């Protein structure tokens, strides 16, 4: 009797659900604009996020990382920096979309405190700290990972 009506409503709901499905994934860690995706299995991203280039702790971390470049490279790391909302991967500029995708995947704001995040080769967040973090502390975390044993 009213079976065609239910079919219509059901069909309409299915189409609506399928049409809106992509919107639910727009901000996920698997956002195609996210360069961290291509690093999975290859590198351990170290992400430095600072609201200002004038941050003394940020400059100190960068200097120490430069001094310990060999240690950094031996651990198959890649440096991401987001400075006042502008992102770089391995010293090369990222697009605003890539930068935003990294921030969303890591669930951090570009205008918050200095944040240091270590991502493992599996793509999972291994460490997130605010303020100055000595590179040695990051290296120690990596050296204790099962894959390094």
Image (cartoon, rainbow, N blue to C red):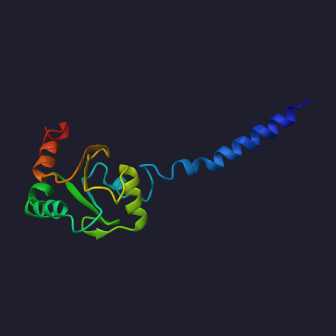
* Residue 26 in the figure: left or right of residue 145: right
The front one of 43 and 125 is 125
Q: Residue at x 37, y 53 (%)?
A: 37
The front one of 1 and 138 is 138
Instruction: Name the quadrant of the C terminus.
Output: top left
Picture coordinates of residue 27 (x, y %)?
47, 52
Q: Residue furthest top?
A: 1
Q: Residue at x 10, y 50 (%)?
A: 136
The front one of 140 and 122 is 140
* Residue 146 in the figure: left or right of residue 21: left
Q: Residue furthest bottom?
A: 93
Q: Residue at x 41, y 57 (%)?
A: 101
Instruction: Name the quadrant of the N terminus.
Output: top right
Q: Residue at x 20, y 53 (%)?
A: 131
Q: Residue furthest right?
A: 1
* Residue 28 in the figure: left or right of residue 10: left
Picture coordinates of residue 109 (x, y %)?
37, 55
Picture coordinates of residue 146 (x, y %)?
18, 36
* Residue 16 in the figure: left or right of residue 130: right
Picture coordinates of residue 7 (x, y %)?
80, 36
Which corner quadrant of the image does residue 2 belong to?
top right
Which corner quadrant of the image does residue 57 belong to?
bottom left
Q: How many numbered discs, if any?
A: 0
């Amino acid at each position: 009797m009213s079976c065609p009506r239910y079919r219509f409503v059901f069909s309409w709901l299915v189409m609506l659900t399928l049409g809106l499905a992509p919107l639910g994934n727009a901000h996920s860690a698997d956002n195609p604009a996210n360069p961290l995706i291509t690093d999975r299995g290859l590198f351990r991203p170290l992400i430095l996020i600072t609201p200002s280039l004038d941050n003394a702790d940020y400059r100190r971390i960068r200097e120490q990382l430069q001094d310990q470049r060999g240690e950094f490279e031996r651990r198959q790391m890649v440096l991401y920096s987001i400075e006042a909302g502008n992102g770089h991967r391995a010293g090369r500029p990222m697009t605003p979309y890539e930068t935003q995708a990294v921030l969303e995947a890591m669930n951090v704001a570009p205008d918050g405190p200095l944040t240091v995040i270590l991502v493992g080769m599996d793509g999972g967040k291994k460490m997130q700290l605010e303020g100055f973090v000595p590179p040695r502390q990051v290296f120690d975390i990596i050296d204790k990972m099962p894959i390094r044993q």
